[in-house]
Image (tube, rainbow, N blue to C red):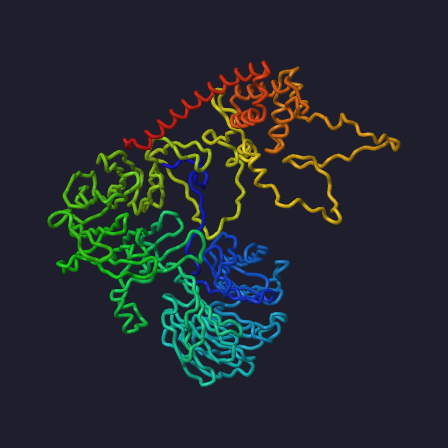
Amino acid sequence: MERDTGGRTASALFAGFRALGLFSNDIPHVVRFNALKRRFYVTTCVGKSFHTYDVQKLSLVAVSNSLPQDICCMAADGRLVFAAYGNVFSAFARNKEVVHTFKGHKAEIHLLQPFGDHVISVDTDSILIIWHIYSEEEYLQLTFDKSVFKISAILHPSTYLNKILLGSEQGSLQLWNVKSNKLLYTFPGWKVGVTALQQAPAVDVVAVGLMSGQVIIHNIKFDETLMKFRQDWGPITSISFRTDGHPIMAAGSPCGHIGLWDLEDKKFINQMRNAHSTAIAGLTFLHREPLLVTNGADNALRVWIFDGPTGEGRLLRFRMGHSAPLTKIRYYGQNGQQILSASQDGTLQSFSTIHEKFNKSLGHGLINKKRVKRKGLQNTLSVRLPPITKFAAEEARESDWDGIIACHQGKLSCSTWNYQRSTIGAYFLKPKELKKDDITATAVDITSCGNFAVIGLSSGTVDVYNMQSGIHRGRFGEDQAHKGSVRGVAVDGLNQLTITTGSEGLLKFWNFKNKILIHSMSLDSSPNMMLLHRDSGILGLALDDFSISVLDIETRKIVREFSGHQGQINDMAFSPDGRWLISASMDCSIRTWDLPSGWSNISLYSVVSLRPLPTDYVPSVVMLPGTCQTEDVELSEETIEPSDEMIEYDSPEQLNEQLVTLSLLPESRWKNLLNLDVIKKKNKPKEPPKVPKSAPFFIPTVPGLVPRYAAPEQNNDPQQSKVVNLGILAQKSDFFLKLEEGLVNNKYDAALNLLKELGPSGIETELRSLSPECGGSVEVMQNFLKMIGMMLDRKRDFELAQAYLALFLKLHLKMLPSEPKLLEEMTQLSSQVEENWIHLQSLFNQSMCILNYIKSALLQ
């Protein structure tokens, strides 16, 4: 189990990354126009934060920082986005950061209205406060009697300076001058609650949406109703007008339909049914564009274009997630970049962990896809399949035929799906002889080759089907594999073994090819679900007594038993290497179980000391990840101080004197030393470099990998001789001088450090200059070999010692036999190198032997 983190609200193994598939909730969206970029942006709420999308491509451009609570309403002007949570609201700049916070309401805020340099907020107690944005101070506060005038809508009429129009649940409307704090006029209304107020393209004209489904086009200057419209779908949720030359008004409804009215002909012209599967939270026509932006609580953001002759909107682009709780999720493929998810909304969708543009929906399951296509049914609710409860996917043959098999709630037949075409597949797989309605498919699996599907039924029958043709290819057992309902089926990676388990508490192993029973064993409790890790042959079984049993399918023995969950286990997952089993339960906990006894792969995460948790341990509550990383939270002093279980470890330069330690230098500094002549030959320019007409100004630097400026030469004597001093041409390098010092004090660290800083060409130059022909001496060459011997004795910088010695031998091999001192030093060095290599090779062989044993040994 996961280690105790000392009371911190965090996990030692896992960190929240981000939430996928969140696009919208029931809070109306906000549309803004950026005059600088000439683009429209739409902002939608996703809980404690909001997303901002570019309407042109619906690409995500910003995710706001999280607020302490869920956002309850939003508004925006040209610069800021305002979001309310509880009785507080904040102003966000750059769609991300909170720059102002406004506190003063006692009840929850449900309306916001920007008003120049001010912003108006209204709470559920009908208290209206006008704030100055930049000073965050109250400018005016108005209190209304909820029983007489409970504010339900707010609007700033166009061209009405310092005036706001308020709608009430009682049906009346009031026009206020907020600068003089005066009630200018009261509209008696239509005795039905006001749900929406929207400015019409004409001055003085306002659209009023009512609880009765009526839309009143009213002139507020003369208090005169111009026209009335009614829809039969319930209260008006939102209203918008086209401003691109077509006098069209759109109104949203609680059932997801949108009504369209022609204001010139004063008639209903069209309807957009099922624009959303839930209530239309918000709809907005873009200014002077035939585009309508809508969002709803079904987690969808859609853009419709009005380019057809009938005046109905056509779906142009959308971002959509699941609108109901998930029933099953699995990674698709081996790269971890796509997640397949099934939901109670009946859809199967794919979400990308890389970018939202790779998301796609495989749609709803349809009972008869050809009939729907042939008859052109718009409303497919009557022919939709119930939600998917279990599915299995394999990408091996996805381009040839369907690669996903799914069973549906209360259905006998299993559907196939095609990931590449993003649609339901060609077959519904079920036994032909079964006609009973009470038998349902309960478990599915698909072979690793993608050719066969194994389906278990509630009757205990387990069948095999061909995925390419949909033909029935056999059955395990004579009539049924189990006496109870099948709770899990699995096929190993080589299609040799099929494992099934039933509610009667039996686990059975079958030969996949001839369908013969190989082995059967009883479980301590009835199984709830089963999961096989094909690569390692480890089988996980979640039982009804909330425990987990782990089996090795080769020995067919239970090798691990885990208990600790306090509720039904909903799902399980293995880590890719098969060493961790992670389980999720209805007790709202996710537990990580280590199958081997030690934490062998802890280095993948961090240096933490892990121990098993006691059975009575109460896990800490952690925050679910949002759509972006949460803001850094200041930790308490107790949290910052390291505990005894988790201490920062500083690695020494060498763990043990008997171990061989490599340097931290990159390979480019030493790996190509022997091939420098070949590299120089390849890099030789075809033509000599041309001298520029006027050489550019440059600051002289000292040669080397670490750039250093050369100090200016001091020339104080104007009468200095111009005769060239030949001694300067034979000046010894710093490395040469440090090696000479080693003759006296027998220390070579300084020389080695200088050599480490040089590049390959510089190292070759230094080693070549050690010979007497190039200004060096035999004593210095002997000293260099002693430095190599010192490096081999210490067993540090091992690869550097080998590379430097190899280059030295390549450069001076001809003269070494003629110098007795160097020959004696080389003989001693040769035995030293051979001894080191034998020791290193034995360590390698021992490590490889242990590693191969661990890989091939069974889990016991």
Can you say whether 778 is above or below 513 in the image? above
Q: Is residue 354 above or below residue 761?
A: below
Front-most of residues 11 and 427: 427
The image position of residue 836, as x and y in percent, is: 47, 20
**In the figure, residue 600 lies in which quadrant?**
top left
> Does residue 448 appear to the left or right of 805 in the view shown?
left
Position in image of residue 283 (x %, y %): 46, 69
Left or right position of 723 against 141: right
Camera-side residue of 12 and 205? 12
Q: Quadrant of residue 37?
A: bottom right
Residue 104 position (above or below residue 622): below
Residue 294 x, y percent position in the rendering:
44, 68
Q: Residue at x 30, y 72 (%)?
A: 377
Q: Position of residue 437 (x, y in %)?
A: 16, 60
Quarter of the image where the N terminus is located: top left
Q: Residue furthest right?
A: 719
Q: Is residue 601 left or right of residue 697?
A: left
> Which residue shows up at 60% across the image and 25% down it?
752
Q: Quadrant of residue 118?
A: bottom right
Relative placement, left or right, of 455 versus 232 is left
Quarter containing the C terminus: top left
